[in-house]
Image: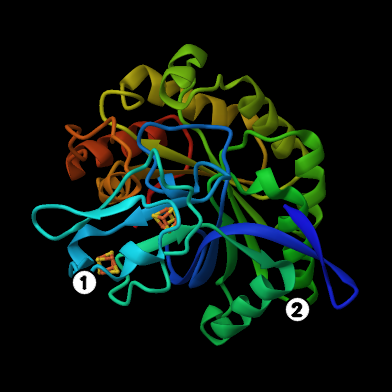
C-alpha cells in the first residue's frame, strides 16, 4: 500500500493482480473479488501464485503467442527471443518485469501481474456489478494475503459500507492485531483459512507456523466478528483423520454464535498452468485432486464432531 499525490489530493493506492466479476465462490451470493499482491505464506498448492509476492512478475501464455515477434524490439533488456517453434521465451535472468512488452502483444500472450489502483478506482469497479449482488452478494478482498495491505482494504471497505455493500475478507489469518483492528469495523464476513493443526506440518506446507493464525482465530471469535473457516483439502497433507478431528474440535472449542463452521475447499489443479506462465516450478505437479467420495467422508467426519460443514462449489 502507498499514497500518491493526484491533483493535490493524497490517494491511497493498492497493488492489485486481478478484479474478478460474478464470482460465486468467495463469500455469499454473487460477488466482485479483488485479489491483492503479497502474502506471508508460500503454500505449495497456491492457486494464485501471481499474488504471492508484492513484486510484479511477467507472465507468458505460450498458447496465445503467434510468433509475430513484435515484442522483441519493445524489450529494453533484450530478454525475449523466439524459440525453434517460433514461440516467445523470456530470459528471467534479464527480464526486469518492466511490462514494456505487454502493450505491443495484441494476442494477449504477455501479462504483467500487478498494477496500482486507488481505493476509489477499486470502489468504482464494485459499482459495475452492483445490480447483480442482490440481498446476499457483495464484494470480497482476497490475495495473496489482503491484510498485507490492511490500510488499503480498510479504506475501500469503508467506502463500501457507506454505500451499503456487503464486505467479505478472504484471509490466511496471518496478520498483526493492528492490521485486523483496521479492517474489522468495515468487514461483514471473514473467510479464515485453516491449513493444519500441527505447527511443524503447517510450516512444512506454508513456510510459517500456525501459532499466530490460531491465536487470531480465537481472538476474532471472541470479538464477535462473523467467521467462516475454510480448509483447503490437500490429499496426503492435511486430510488424515487425526488432523480433520483436531480442526473440527478447534472450531467447536471457539463456541461462538458468530462462527459459521467449516467450508472444505478440495484441492484442484486449475492453478498449475499459472506456474509455467510465471516461469516457476509447481511443487505438486503429480498430486491428483481428491475423489468426491473422500471429500464427502471428510465433511461427514467434521459434522459428526458437531461442527457445521459444507463443500465449496
Ligand atoms: S517485462 Fe520488460 S524486461 Fe521483461 S520481457 Fe517485457 S519488456 Fe523485457
Ligand atoms: S508480441 Fe505477443 S504474440 Fe507476438 S511474439 Fe511477442 S509474445 Fe508472441
Q: Position of residue 41 (x, y in %)?
A: 53, 32
Check contact, mark 2 vs mark 1: CB within 8 A. no
Q: Return the residue found at the far top.
A: 200
Q: Position of residue 224 (x, y in %)?
A: 75, 45
> Does residue 235 appear left or right of residue 126 in this picture?
left
Q: On residue 203, which mark appears?
A: none
Q: Along the line of sight, which residue is nearer the eye, 172 or 241?
A: 172
Q: Which residue is mark 1?
A: 68
Q: Is residue 240 above or below residue 303?
A: above
Q: Is residue 308 visible?
A: yes
- Secondary structure, mark 2, is loop
- Residue visible at 46% across and 30% down in the picture: 195
Q: Which residue is mark 2?
A: 163
Answer with the quadrant where ligand 1 appears in the image. Answer: bottom left
- Residue visible at 78% across and 35% down in the picture: 177
Q: Is residue 258 visible?
A: no
Quadrant where the image shows the C terminus: bottom left
Q: How is the image coloured?
A: rainbow
How many numbered marks does the figure carry? Answer: 2
Q: Is residue 20 above or below residue 55?
A: below
- Residue visible at 9% across and 53% down in the picture: 84
Choose top left, top right, bottom left or bottom right for residue 10.
bottom right
In front of the other: label 2 or label 1?
1
Q: Is residue 24 above or below residue 81?
A: below
Q: Is residue 174 above or below residue 237?
A: below
Q: Position of residue 250 (x, y in %)?
A: 55, 26
- Residue visible at 78% across and 52% down in the picture: 151
* Cα–Cα gap, marks 2 and 1: 47 Å
Q: Along the line of sight, which residue is nearer the eye, 69 or 47?
A: 69
- Secondary structure, mark 1, is loop
Instruction: Answer yes or no: disc 2 within 8 Å of ligand 1.
Output: no
Q: Residues within 10 Å of mark 1 (few under 14, many from 20)?
A: some
Amino acid at each position: 500500500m502507498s499514497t500518491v499525490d493526484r491533483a493535490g489530493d493524497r490517494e491511497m493506492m493498492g497493488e492489485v493482480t486481478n478484479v474478478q466479476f460474478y464470482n460465486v465462490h468467495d463469500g455469499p451470493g454473487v460477488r466482485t473479488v479483488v485479489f491483492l499482491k503479497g502474502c506471508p505464506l508460500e503454500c505449495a498448492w497456491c492457486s494464485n501464485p501471481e499474488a504471492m509476492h508484492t513484486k510484479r512478475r511477467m507472465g507468458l501464455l505460450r498458447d496465445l503467442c503467434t510468433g509475430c515477434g513484435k515484442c522483441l524490439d519493445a524489450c529494453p533488456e533484450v530478454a525475449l527471443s523466439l524459440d525453434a517453434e517460433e514461440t516467445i521465451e523470456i530470459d528471467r535472468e534479464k527480464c526486469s518485469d518492466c511490462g514494456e512488452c505487454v502493450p505491443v502483444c495484441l494476442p494477449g500472450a504477455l501479462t504483467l501481474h500487478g498494477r496500482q489502483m486507488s481505493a476509489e478506482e477499486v470502489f468504482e469497479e464494485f459499482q459495475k456489478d452492483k445490480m447483480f449482488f442482490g440481498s446476499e452478494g457483495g464484494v470480497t478482498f482476497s490475495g495473496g494475503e489482503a491484510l498485507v495491505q490492511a490500510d488499503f482494504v480498510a479504506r475501500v471497505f469503508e467506502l463500501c459500507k457507506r454505500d451499503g455493500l456487503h464486505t467479505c475478507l478472504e484471509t490466511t489469518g496471518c496478520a498483526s492485531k493492528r492490521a485486523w483492528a483496521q479492517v474489522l469495523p468495515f468487514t461483514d464476513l471473514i473467510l479464515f483459512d485453516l491449513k493444519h493443526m500441527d505447527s511443524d506440518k503447517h510450516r512444512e506446507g506454508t513456510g510459517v507456523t500456525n501459532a499466530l493464525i490460531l491465536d487470531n482465530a480465537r481472538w476474532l471469535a471472541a470479538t464477535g466478528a462473523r467467521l467462516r473457516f475454510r480448509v483447503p483439502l490437500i490429499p496426503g497433507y492435511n486430510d488424515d483423520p487425526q488432523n480433520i478431528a483436531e480442526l473440527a474440535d478447534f472450531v467447536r472449542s471457539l463456541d461462538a454464535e458468530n462462527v459459521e463452521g467449516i467450508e472444505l475447499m478440495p484441492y484442484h489443479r486449475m492453478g498449475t498452468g499459472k506456474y509455467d506462465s510465471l516461469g516457476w516450478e509447481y511443487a505438486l505437479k503429480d498430486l491428483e485432486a481428491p475423489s468426491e467420495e473422500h471429500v464427502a467422508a471428510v465433511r461427514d467426519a467434521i459434522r459428526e464432531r458437531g461442527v457445521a460443514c459444507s463443500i465449496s462449489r
